[in-house]
Image (cartoon, helix red, strand yellow):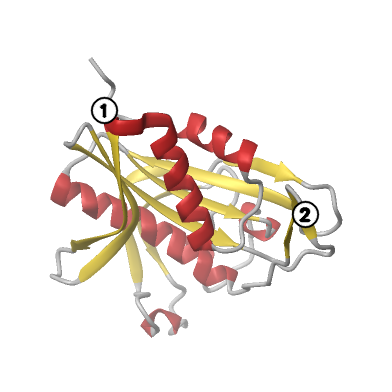
Amino acid sequence: MNDPKIDINLILKKLRSKRKVFHSEADFQFELAWNIKEIYNERANIRLEYCTINESGINQYIDIVVIMDHKHFIPIELKYKTKSSENTIVDNNEMYNLKSQGAQDLGKFDYLHDIERVESFKSLYGFSEGYCILLTNDASYTKIRDNNTRNKEFNIGHNQIKHGTLRWRSDSSIYTKKHRKESIILDGSYEMKWDTYYDFNNGKNSKFFILVTTIY
């Protein structure tokens, strides 16, 4: 019997062999989806920006939904956070001029919010697994900060375990902006395990890190 799941490690290995850096999050999304289709062929139907309705009746979008064998839904949420590199990065004769996105506190919140959203997708559709993936050349995402910052509970440094209710520090009002809110509530428990995606060895911010979280 065919496995209804996908091998995310195989997919990322194939992706890395072809693309080691991306121009944007949309570029990353497209290439990852393309690789999934190449590996699983007719077994996998790919949907980008899949629209669902959350428990509050508001539309929300999942970056990639893989429908395996026409019945097994696998949601994948992506984040691509960049910092300006010291030198121009070249991959397969293609030049990449990365820009600094900053706002790491919001980036960390958004990654954990992605996990929360994938969990809510399960309550609506059910699935055997889902994934959240963060790719970055900003090493600050991988580190654990001990100071009492306003986003301390949203720290996703290496080996951090995230579960339960996570809140902004009481004196922060930043959650009132855009889709961000006062807290994130996770049903499961997740260990943040960072790996090296690729190191160009081309000066500051030329090493890329990847975080993959599996939601069951």
- Element on which disc 1 rests: loop
Q: Position of residue 183 (x, y in %)?
A: 35, 68
194 on left or right of 90: left
- Element on which disc 2 rests: strand
Q: Quadrant of residue 57?
A: bottom left
Q: Residue at x 45, y 34 (%)?
A: 8
- Give the camera-side residue of 179 and 35: 35
Q: Which residue lies under the disc numbered 2?
A: 90
Q: Quadrant of residue 17?
A: top right
Q: Residue at x 61, y 56 (%)?
A: 22
Quarter of the figure with the C terminus: top left
Q: Position of residue 92 (x, y in %)?
A: 73, 47
Quarter of the figure with the N terminus: top left
Labels in figure, total? 2
Mark closer to the chain start, 2 or 1: 1
Q: Which residue lies under the disc numbered 1?
A: 4
